[in-house]
C-alpha cells in the first residue's frame, strides 16, 4: 500500500505537463504559452485525460540555449504552489536522417500552502527531433527522467523507487509567420512502475505499467527574430 501512495503522488506531479521546450528558441526570442492535459483515467463510460492546465514562459539566451519555466494553474486551485524551471540545450544538429538532439535539465517544486510543506524533484529530458518543410515543423521522441530524493516513503518506510521513467513522442506545428506554435504530446508515464492496485483508475496503452498522458498546447512569440 505504501508503494501505491508513492506511485500516485509521483505520477500525479510528473503528469502535469509535457516537456517544455524540445527545440531551443532563437537568441533574444521570448514566448508565452499554456498546455492542457495529463494522465489518462477511467471515468465511466469513457477514458479521459486529467484536465491539468499549466502556463509557461521561455527565453532564448543563445540560438542553442533556452531558459524556461512553468506554473500549474490546476494545482493552485487546490492549495498547491507548483512550478517548474529549467534549460534546453541543443548539442547535435540535424543532418538528413540524423536528428537534432537536445537535453533539458529542470526541476519540479510543489508547496502545500495548508500543511506548509514542500517537495523538490530533479528532472532530465533528452529528445531527438526532426525538422521538415518550409515552416520547419518537427516530430520528436525522447524520454523523461524524474528523480525522487527522499530516503523514505509514507510512514517512514525506506524509499522503494528513486526513478520514474517516461518515454514521450510529440509534434510541433508552427504558424505561417513563425509567431505561434501548436504542440501535441503523448507521454508513457512511469512505465517502470505498476499501477494495477492504485485507487486512482489510471489507464494506458501499456496496460498496468504506468499510465499514458495526452497534452495539447499553444505557444505565442512576443517578439519575432
Image (tube, grey):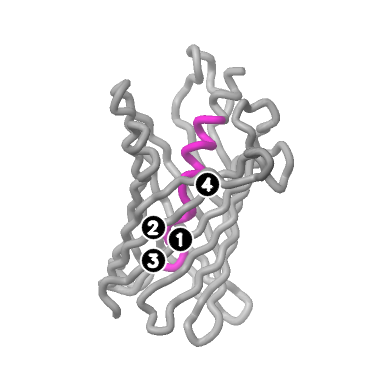
- Name the residue tied to disc 1: 217
| Earlier sequence position, callout 4 versus callout 3 | 4
Q: Quadrant of residue 193?
A: top right
- Name the residue tied to disc 2: 34
Q: Is residue 32 above or below residue 114?
A: below
- CA distance for labels 4 and 1: 12 Å
- CA distance for labels 3 and 2: 7 Å
Report the front residue among 42 and 163: 42
Q: Which mark is residue 38?
A: 4
Question: What quarter of the picture does the C terminus occupy?
Answer: bottom left
* Residue 173 picture location, percent across and down: 50, 73
- CA distance for labels 1 and 2: 6 Å
Question: What quarter of the picture does the N terminus occupy?
Answer: top right
| Earlier sequence position, callout 4 versus callout 1 | 4
Q: Are marks 1 and 3 in contact (CB under 8 Å)?
A: yes
- Name the residue tied to disc 3: 219
Q: Residue at x 60, y 60 (%)?
A: 169
Q: Residues within 10 Å of mark 4 (few under 14, many from 20)?
A: many
Tag 2, which secondary structure?
Answer: strand
| Earlier sequence position, callout 3 versus callout 2 | 2
Q: Residue furthest right?
A: 207
What's the magenta region?
8-23
Amino acid at each position: 500500500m505504501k508503494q501505491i501512495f508513492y506511485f500516485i503522488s509521483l505520477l500525479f506531479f510528473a503528469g502535469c505537463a509535457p516537456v517544455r521546450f524540445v527545440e531551443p528558441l532563437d537568441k533574444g526570442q521570448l514566448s508565452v504559452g499554456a498546455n492542457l492535459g495529463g494522465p489518462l483515467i477511467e471515468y465511466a463510460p469513457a477514458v479521459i485525460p486529467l484536465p491539468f492546465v499549466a502556463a509557461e514562459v521561455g527565453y532564448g539566451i543563445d540560438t542553442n540555449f533556452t531558459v524556461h519555466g512553468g506554473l500549474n494553474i490546476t494545482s493552485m486551485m487546490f492549495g498547491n504552489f507548483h512550478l517548474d524551471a529549467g534549460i534546453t540545450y541543443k548539442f547535435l544538429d540535424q543532418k538528413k536522417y540524423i536528428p537534432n538532439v537536445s537535453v533539458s535539465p529542470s526541476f519540479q517544486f510543489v508547496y502545500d500552502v495548508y500543511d506548509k510543506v514542500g517537495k523538490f524533484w530533479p528532472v532530465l529530458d533528452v529528445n531527438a527531433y526532426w525538422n521538415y518543410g518550409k515552416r520547419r515543423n518537427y516530430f520528436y521522441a525522447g524520454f523523461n527522467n524524474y528523480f525522487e530524493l527522499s530516503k523514505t516513503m509514507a510512514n517512514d518506510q525506506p524509499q522503494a523507487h528513486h526513478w520514474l521513467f517516461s518515454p514521450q513522442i510529440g509534434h510541433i506545428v508552427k504558424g505561417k509567420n513563425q509567431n505561434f506554435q501548436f504542440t501535441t504530446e503523448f507521454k508513457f508515464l512511469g512505465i517502470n512502475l505498476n499501477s494495477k492496485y492504485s485507487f486512482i483508475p489510471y489507464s494506458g496503452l501499456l496496460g498496468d505499467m504506468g499510465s499514458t498522458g495526452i497534452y495539447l498546447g499553444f505557444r505565442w512569440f512576443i517578439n519575432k527574430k
